[in-house]
Image (cartoon, grey):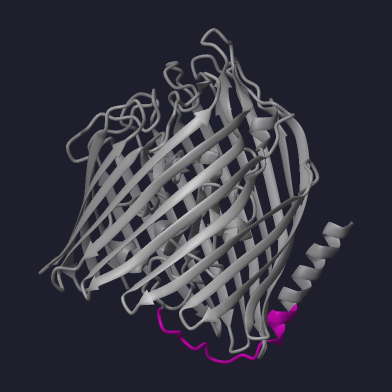
Amino acid sequence: MIRNKFVYFTAFVLLEGVFSLKLQAVTDLERIVVTRYSDQASGHGVVSATLDQDDIQKIPAQTPEDLVTYLGGDVQSRGSYGVKSDISFNASTFQQVLILVNGMRVKDPQTAHHDLDLFFNMEDVERVEIIPAASSSIYGPDGSGGAINFILKKPKKKKNSITLSGGNDETFEEKLNLFYSLKELHNSLSASHASSNGYSYDTDYKTDTFFHSSAFEDDNADVYFDAGYNQKEFGAYDFYTPGSNLPSKEWTNTKFFNLRSNFRKEKFTFSPRFLFRKHHDKFILDITRPSYFLNHTDTQMNEEGGELKFTVFNIDAVLGADYGEESMVSDKMGKHFRSHWDIYLSPMFEINEKTTLKVTMRQDDYSSINGEWTGSASLKHILSESMDGFVSLGRTIRVPTFTELYYSDPTTAGDPDLKPEHAYHLEAGLNKKIKDNVDVSGSFFVRQEYDTIDFTKMTPLDAKFIARNISQATTHGLNLYGQWRMTEKTAFDARYLFANKRQKSDGLIYKYGINYLKHMVNIGYNQMLPFGSNRLDFIIKKKPGRKEWVLVNDRLTWKAQKNCEVFLEVYNLFNVSYEEIVGIPQAGRQVKVGTTFKW
């Protein structure tokens, strides 16, 4: 089979690179700080927002997906500690956000509800990038709202650590991080366990995550290997049946494997890669009637391919290709399989000293649908020493998930005849340094969607929500951000988001309602203290047809000794009652106290 030959070839190239490297000391590279709207920051184009290590260590967040809130994402939590969350950007559906890890796709083929069953810990994250929808086209389907790129730390020698913490609702958490080297092969291991009785009936959880990373770096080549495992067991009260008062239960586990490399020559870099992800989901709709609806689902995806980065006629370009397979075995959805391949070319032209143009052309072909062309053009211009701007145009697609195609339970049904979604994007933004200590930026976007997929009813009397292609939708909005570093020890940052979405849906009733952010305000305050630091955040959210709510989160750290830190985290300080998704109440005030030892 072609696929098997491609796998063997990719593995051979990677392993050959490992054994051909000269055993010599790895040179530590200077730390790169990513700024807003920086071209090539993620390796492929415009990045609209980032969190680096300094940010991640300060803000009140428990899991990697929590970080996305501070970048303008709408994290739609269904329970505590990331047991189940969806993400929306710029009024997209949760299915329209592409999840990347080190620039590689990790979308779940069953449903985007499982996209955030992540296989690494907070401590493994080096940086988080938000990639605008138009620029996401180089990564393939599903980025109509944009893409999130979790860039993980390279396993270089750092201090080992252990963290112990606890809070209300009998919440406990333990974390371990270890670094070790075998000659020039550097390794890291992280492990975590968290559990809670839950903030209300049927919201308890237990979760475990293990992640291992290895790296071999040389002047001419790098080889990286990552492996992760995550398992969750949690009460899922009304998670998928909002307002029905069904006490559900869910178990998931995720296995991940990734091998990638960079081989550098004078005029080009070749980067082969291989990724494997397997996910298991067990779901009981009503734990008081286990036989009423019980479903086991196993999904598997693998992708192998690579990129060639080269320069010709003073034009920097990326040429890439991939082959992948997705499969599912489910009690309620049966067995399904699809394969896909892609090829893309992305040259960047320096029009003059101040202006660059990056173009992406991509072809995706799935065994279940006809081939689709997507692409984008991004123009960046330096207006002055203190200001630059960009404008991007793009076309994206989204392929229906297996759940949208084949699912069936007492309340929901898929449609195997669904068509892919299509969207066209226009985005423009400015980045301005007003003073050495004041930065502001803003962007405007318009998105035109066709054949958007959602679960809907024609009338309230219909027995089930059925997956349908909605004719079209138009969305426009603003993203504004500012940072003021008042002193060396004090800083403010503020973000405002606005979006308005008009759908031609012929009076359809949506399963999760019209659930996008109309307005969001996030105001953060950083204060360095004599004994540590404090980060305070005010988050205001407003969704169509609903009253706004305000959340206040805080993280206070105290360096008790040179290698010992004590921290206090408070979420929803004022115990506000709110629902990210109508019919699924969220946790009230949560308090966590802990300590971290390093050696």
Q: Position of residue 340 (x, y in %)?
A: 76, 51
Near-viewer residue (144 or 415)? 144
Q: Position of residue 24 (x, y in %)?
A: 57, 92
Q: Is residue 518 left or right of residue 514?
A: left
Query: Which residue shows up at 36% across the image and 37% down it?
Result: 518
Q: Is residue 534 left or right of residue 171?
A: left
Q: Position of residue 68 (x, y in %)?
A: 40, 52
Near-viewer residue (561 or 437)? 437
What's drawn in magenta, residue-wise? Answer: 16-31
| Residue 186 drawn above or below residue 120 | below
**Res. 50 in view:** no
Near-viewer residue (562 or 374)? 374
Q: Quadrant of residue 307?
A: bottom right
Q: Is residue 400 left or right of residue 36?
A: right
Query: Which residue shows up at 53% across the image and 21% down it?
Result: 285
Q: Quadrant of residue 377?
A: bottom right
Query: Which residue shows up at 56% across the image and 71% down it?
Result: 357
Q: Position of residue 572 (x, y in %)?
A: 23, 40
| Residue 282 drawn above or below residue 246 | below
Query: Which residue shows up at 71% across the image and 38% down it?
Result: 328
User: Is residue 22 rendered magenta in the image?
Assistant: yes
Quadrant where the N terminus lies?
Answer: bottom right
Q: Main secondary structure of the magenta part?
A: loop
Number of numbered tags placed on the structure image:
0
